[in-house]
Image (tube, rainbow, N blue to C red):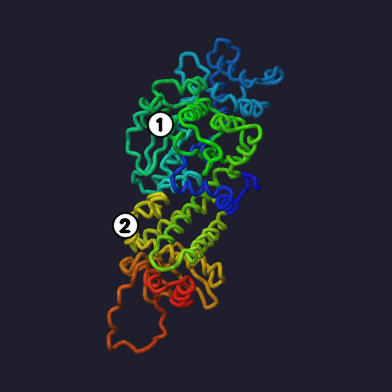
Amino acid sequence: MPNAATITVPETLALLDGQFASVARAVAEDRYVLWLGSGISFGRVDGLRQVIARVLEFLRVRTIPGDPACRFGRALRAALELAPITPEEEARVDLTQPFATWPDSNHIVVRLCNNYARLLDINVQGESEDYLLWEAVELRATFADPAKPPDVEHLCLAMLVLEGACSDLASANWDGLIESAVTTMTGGQPALSVCARPEDLRNPALRGRLIKFHGCAVLATHNEAAYRPFLVARQSQINGWISRPENAAVRGRLVDLVATKPTLMIGLSAQDANIQALFAQAAVQMPWRWPGNPPSYVFSANELGGDQQGLLQIVYRQDMTPGNRQQIIDEARIQAYAKPLLLALVLHLLCSKIRALVDLAPGAIPVADRQSLRDGVIALRNFVAASVAPDPLSFINVFIDQWGRSLHLIRNGSLTHATGRYQPLTVESIANIGANPGLPASGLRETAVAAGLIGYGVSRGEWQIDTPASNAVRDGMFRLHAPSGGVKVFFTSGPISAMQLKQDGHLVDADEAIVIHGHKLIPAMARSPRAAPGRTGRREVREVSLATLLESSATLDELFQKFRMELAI
């Protein structure tokens, strides 16, 4: 099994196709609650080590050396005692020098990582209880900086939300990077409801609801009076969170989510007492049983930590025995960290939706033949996944822009009124796609079949696919290469979208291009009698209607042969 830190996206997809297929399916059906921790924001906001070092330096620069009554000096001594430091280390402390230059600074920071909440609970005489969090941590600059762009994890989470696969998220993070990612995707259109205090639960849920049960730095920066009291960081807050009356509504909602929807934890150690207590309460109200399909509790981790294993003992107390304990632990662990796992979940979701649309497409193609089309979609997915390395952030940004542009063109034939970077394939989860009354008119079912045919042709060695020559719309959505040559390809829902492509100058008759329509073509008007008879030798746009091909084909072989003849490559 690959290590969680080094596993590739194709290898993670293999896990989601195999051992964790039920997890991937349940995510696509919006059955899981995603519980998120600091692991999804590594590289974007400071981690514990940087925060701890900043707090110690904050106290040091305000300490008056040699003054035992100095309030900052007393707080600094309390912090060092939490480490704790040895007599030899204490002798090497030099308050006149920056903390980062102390010979034992790294050892001190590492030891304080397990006591970060107690560190932030240290009181500075004359200051508010959250003084160290608000001032020393520099919470607003560190966790609410609008200049910090979302990372891969946040962009993927935004895509899952917009695709209807993640309507419930719970996060211990203060930063606003998920919200920023959603805003970027939608062009500012509201899509995610953020709850950082009880009153926020009354707001519309929109596409998804993000419950930030440890508070939100962005909201606290914009409205300090309303949201600063709900920032949770200190040990006394964490220990008392579950019983404080002001948290009752949020606590009740989270307990309900744990009891009614399976849990997928990503980047969250579950070490905080309030998290353990939430899951214990839910297990009392309505426990999940083991084994489950899908698994009731899943962690993104290389090895489960002690707190994660302890949580499993709490929630599976009726079923865990010495004989099955290791099996339960192994089944609850996906050995892929946040970045590869979320990338794989996004690609798996989009692939699964396209495959579902293949099944819903009209026509007489039998179920067994449609499986080959479904496999063709997987071939395309795997082709895309192979290009993630070595730069996942560059990949996901290009993917978002190309996917969003392609869906805009399929639906409208134009980018004139495009809003936001991303267009969801469907706004509903995979379980509800068939209930969408607008699906037949969208042409998406037929377009999905076209994608399956393209992938089927790739797997047979009939042609190869490649990215467009440039980001210009005129260069197509992708290119097909066959022994006879290459050609750029456009998908459209139907002739009206294709006409808009031409009207906007993205598609001209002199182009060597193929336009694959979901719907039937509009019959061409009769040629002028002055037109030259027969072939003119000029290149021209070729147009293919999947609706027509599906209507006239009874088997996959028949459909594919007609499709290949229409492409003429």
What type is the residue that disc 2 sits on? Answer: Gly
**Residue nearest the viewer, comparing 201 with 110:** 201
Residue at screen point 56% across, 47% down: 20
* Residue toward you, 369 or 267: 369
Look at label 1 and name its amino acid: Arg
SS at circle 1: helix
Asked whether residue 41 is in view, the answer is no
**Mark 2 vs 1, N-terminal side:** 1
Residue farthest top in this picture: 69
Q: Are marks 2 and 1 in contact (CB under 8 Å)?
A: no
Residue 15: give x, y in percent of width and height.
58, 50
**Where residue 5 sits: x, y (%)?**
62, 44
**Residue at the location (54% across, 50% down)?**
21
Question: Residue at 34% across / 46% down in the picture?
Answer: 189
Let me know if residue 268 appears in the view.
yes
Q: Secondary structure at mark 2?
A: loop
Can you identify the residue that label 1 sits on?
253
Total numbered labels placed on residues in the image:
2
The part of the image, by quadrant, that contains residue 271 is top right
Label 1: few (<14), some (14–19) or many (≥20) C-alpha neighbours in 10 Å: some
Residue 86 image offset from top left, x and y in percent: 69, 19
Residue identified by numbered label 2: 438
Q: Give the number of the disc on residue 467.
A: none
| 328 vs 225, nearest the viewer | 328
Which residue sits at x=57%, y=33%?
319
Give how far across and how far down residue 55 sits, in percent: 54, 25
Using residue 514 as the reference point, say whether residue 456 is left or right of it.
right
Placement of 128 over or under 331, stated as above or below: above
